[in-house]
Image (spheres, rainbow, N blue to C red):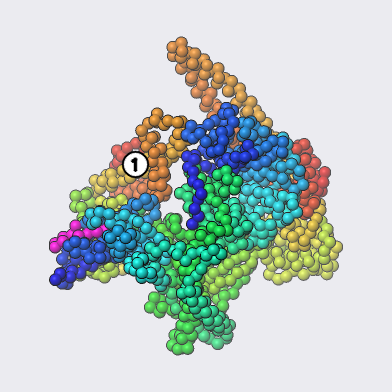
Amino acid sequence: MKNLVPVLACEDRLLRVMRDSDVLYSVELPSPSTCLQLFYNDGGENGDQLLYGTSDGKIGLVQLGRGAAIHRWVSENGGGAGSVGSSRRGGVTSMDHHDMTGDGIRDLIVGRDDGSLEVYSYEDGDEAEPTLRFSMACNESVTSVQGAVVGSAGYDEIVASTYTGWVFGATTEPMDRHMTSESGVVQISQDSKLKIEKLRGEIDDLQQRVLRERDQYQAATQSAFPGISAVPFFSINDKMTLNRSDASYLLSLEVQTAIDNVLLQSDVPIDLLDVEKNSAVVSYSTCDPDSGNFLLATYRCQANTTRLEVRIRTIEGQYGTLQAYITPRLQPKCCQVRQYRIKPLSLHSRIHSFDPNRPYNVLTLKGHFTFPEIHSWVVFCLPELPERTPTGEQAEFTFVSTFLETQLHCVYSAKEAIFKSDNISTISILKDVLTKEATRKKVQLDISCEVSEESVVHALQLLHPRLGAQLMLAKQVSLIDALRELSSHESDTSFLSPEYQYILDNADDLQAQYRKQPCHLERLYGMITDLYIDKYKFKGINVKSRVPQLLEILDNYGNLNIQHLTNFFQAQ
Amino acid sequence: MLVPVFTLDLKQKILPGRVCIGKYDSAHACLTASTTADKVFIHNPHQRLGTSGGRMSLSQSSAEISLLNINQTVSAITAGVLTQARHGDTLVVGTPTNVLAYDVQNNADVFYKDVSDGANAIAIGRLGHHLSPMALIGGNCSIHGFDSEGNDPFWTVTGDNVTSLTLTDFDGDEENELLVGSEDFDIRVFKNEEIMDLAFGYALANGTVGVYEKLARWWRIKSKNQAIAIYSYDLDGDGVPELITGWSNGKIDARNDRSGEVMFKDNFQSTVAGIVEGDYRMDGKNQLIACSVDGEVRGYKASTAETRYSMMDVNIEQETIRELSQRRHTLLLELKNYEENQRMGSSGEIVYGKPSTAGDQVGIIPANTQLQTGLAINMGNEEKNKPPHVEIALATTNDTVIRAVIIFAEGIFEGESHVYHPRESILTSNIRIPLYPPKDVPVDLHIKAMVGYKASLHYHVFELTRQLPRFSMYALCTVAVTPPQGYVKFKLPERVARIVMWVNSNFLLLEDLQLDEDGALDVSFLSLRTSMPLLIQANNQCEMTIRTDDMELASDLIQALANYLNLEDLQVEADFPSELDQLASLLERVEEYHATRQRLSAEMADHSGVIRTLVVRAEDARLMSDMESMRHWYRELYNLNKDLISGYKIRCNNHQELLNCLKQVNQTIQKAGRLRAGKSKTAVISACRQAIKSNNVSALAKIIRTGSS
């Protein structure tokens, strides 16, 4: 008989494989896992293969060995089966295996929180990621999927349940069975007819009761007698997740009934990005700086929208709260507030390996703070950390910047905390925030900073390829129209230089890529400017007046090289 | 889902909104659209077009496509029967400065005319009582009608830049009326040459699409995408056309003309560029043809009654059940709210007055909480840098506070909503929200106020609608003001009391106005935008005078009044010295710009002569291997080229200025027309046109003052 091995999927991007109550070993995943399922429902040949689905839509297979695990494959957005990269898939909520295609091999059925249902087939067994065969969308987040024969004997079905409590089946049965008769009238089966009639009756009955109650409620609001109007909370399924690939947050809100409107308010500057599948009409309101608002936006939803997605871009170092006021279409009209912290280092995410070979800037704090205190400060600054103070004397966490891939290493205990990062801006932000927090708590801090000159060059070298690529992309995209015009006049475009031919051949891809990352260049510029200012800030020099010069260099970056930029950074 | 009957890839970019279909030889439909590089392409899969040469050239990539060189930005394009004398359609192409009517079959220009107002939109057809068809060109505030000879028998002005034009029999008298959409958010209907106030679909820049029948709107929907093209086509074969909309995100949908319900939809990979109708399969039936900006073309066939049902969603019974269940679900939720409310109310243990937090799972306020609203004028505060404005006051009747207010209204905010969200620390039960309506239009304010307690996670939402009167940005003036110079005088066959009623309902007044002892009306207002006075006077004979220096305000007032009183005709006497002076100086500047343009054109012609000689000399030198002089001549050429470029820039600026001036002139004429109503209005506009044509500035001023020359 096989031993059962518990496997835990944890928020900190780890799978923990247990033996009794101890962790045997842990497996690092690309993002927090939301769903686990045995491969092929039985763990594969040796029963040791495990599928995981993540909060940002990835699916992967790991083989759990005795002392370590092997990653078999990870599918980024659904195996690239003709899907355009810009349509990010929703988090995986449920997986099952069932032979839907009738080829004798079970297929993978996936339910996602953006309402899509997908069927993948394994073409190479457990060797390679499966290919997407079918998909359908149902506009509500899927909570569970299962494949089986349910409604009609001999036809495989997918049964799914959704957040609003809807259970439905998607069948392989051809549906034109009871279609049009000769008169052109659709025949409805007896069964459905009864069901519809029953529902109609129920609704009429309910409507009467609701009307009565509504009148009573209205009467109460008019009476002088001091009653109360108590409306219970409606449940909201909300999530704000950091997307690693483009360093933006995805806020999703879902309510059991149709949403009327959502008001987003933020006390820090953030950008809202358009989400393709949203049908809600967004409107930005002007913000009076005196009112402490940096963003006021309303989303007026179309009828029957129960789910809203908003993509948000944050700026590191700017921290505060984002509030969502959600008003559903339900009488008596009420709204509920949800608050989301925008942390100072909002674009960092947890990793579990630290590269000690980079040039690091080190920030050391000493003072009379307790372990829980310093932990709460770190939690205040960084995402993906548990609120509870870790057990033991000392805590050690590593983070990576999703935008720049610089690392941050935190080691702290009572009375001492050490932060290392190869990005001087990260250290600068931490220093500012921690000092502020400590002053608020009236804790004396002894702060020392070790700035590594090398780290600035290192960070610039990390930035360099991205900056180059973005500038190149911008240049290529701007040439597309002109080149297309040329090609429309010439029967043969072979006289063009290889570079131009490349642009012409890949025009659509380039444009899609360009559209996918709006303001990417501006973000990079901002990052470099921060780096520049922070570098000199640690020396006690204010270089704000020299920023225009820096921007000039950046604008001409295409013609210059990285040496130019490093020289500028090193100039006194 | 809609299944296309044919799909083509033309491999040509198509500019959005510039697509038409023409039967140039009167038999074969050709898709015609403007593409990059100032060209127009004609796709003719059925028959070879006439010879190439002149404007026309055959495309290198496809034998079915011919290209027309326009050499100017194409701003509008359409095809239609312009002359009876010749069979087949004429292609009309509009550019920012010219309009070209082109005979595709014979590869010849029909006419080529300067239109200084530009051509933003073109429609071809018979208008009103005009016998021959015309090409109607909508430009900056003006509409020209050209016949097949290139004469312009029709001309009128409209409020702002024309963005769309269509011809239809609006009132069912078998004469076409012209529907004009323009940048000032208005749709105007012109009959002959007068604006009137049938079903037509419309699409707005903010993503709204809807259908009007006469003046009643059947429905409208708003999307975050923009509608690029709309078309009416009977896709399901039931005899009633659907509104087909092509969207900027590549979606195309067909909606029921009465309910706005989506009947069919399809998706393109890129923005939809245009939707037309034509017989593209040569089977004697017209298909609906949609194209995307990337040159993808799809044709859809109207279905017959037999096949109609197969297009219907097969899951109809499931859909019904689903919809009903959803309704039941919503009702149940509402019922739960009331039951919970009652349970808590009767248990008596819950006290209100504190914020509802996550642990409470319920939001409570006193049942008799009410929200009071009021509209008032606030004269502003200069120290706090607050200009005068209209303000809306909201207050609750007890200790509950107003957390936030969302006001949905159209046309007065940047988006469709305005949010008031103060800091947590200064929440009160009594707030004032300033509004700055930019235009004099009546606006419905849909107010949603969130009421509860400080730091609460749950608020009750109070919803109400208030109407902002049309002239709310004018404050009643209690002290005497110096009367402005400009005025309009007219006599109305009405009782003064009705005028007073009109003033009471269109201005924001604290208490209703009354007639004075003599039965006369004398009231003065101050504009909150400009602080300029406005006087409205009427004696007991109902002889009215409106005094203001703002001609536009006067015309708005008269149009609103004429509408209210159902006036068929109104002749007035008017004088606006400052505007008339401005008009005179504008016309002078127009003269100057015209002169400059001619001079610049002459210079350019000179230059082109020199260029020719320089090129010849340089090439000669090259052939003789005289590198020294070749370099010399090319240097000369280079300098000349620089001159040409700077000359071009001057011409561009000059042209832009000219356009601005002409636009203002047109707007002044429009305002002068709007000071009158009915026939008098039409008369003024055509008289003004004549005066401008003959360049008679003094006559123009006289027409604006008296209404006739």
Amino acid found under the numbered disc labelled 1:
Gly
Residue B458 in which image quadrant: bottom left
Residue A467 in which image quadrant: top left
Image spot of residue A164 (x, y percent) = 42, 71
A362 relative to A147 in the view: left or right = left
Question: What element does badge 1 sit on?
Answer: helix
Question: What residue did someone put label 1 on?
Answer: A468
**Start and end of the magenta stretch?**
A60-70
Protein chain holding label 1? A
Q: Residue at x 52, y 65 (%)?
A: A181
Q: Quadrant of the C terminus of chain B?
A: top right
**Considering only vertical position in the picture, is A480 above or below B351?**
above
Image spot of residue B578 (x, y percent) = 73, 47
Image spot of residue B512 (x, y percent) = 73, 70
Q: Residue at x 77, y 47 (%)?
A: B129
Dot 1, crowdedness within 10 Å: few (<14), some or many (≥20)? some
Image spot of residue A128 (x, y percent) = 25, 53
Q: Does the magenta stretch include residue A48?
A: no
Q: Nearer the viewer, residue B416 or A434?
A: B416
**Considering only vertical position in the picture, is B278 above or below B496?**
above
Q: Does the magenta stretch include residue A63?
A: yes
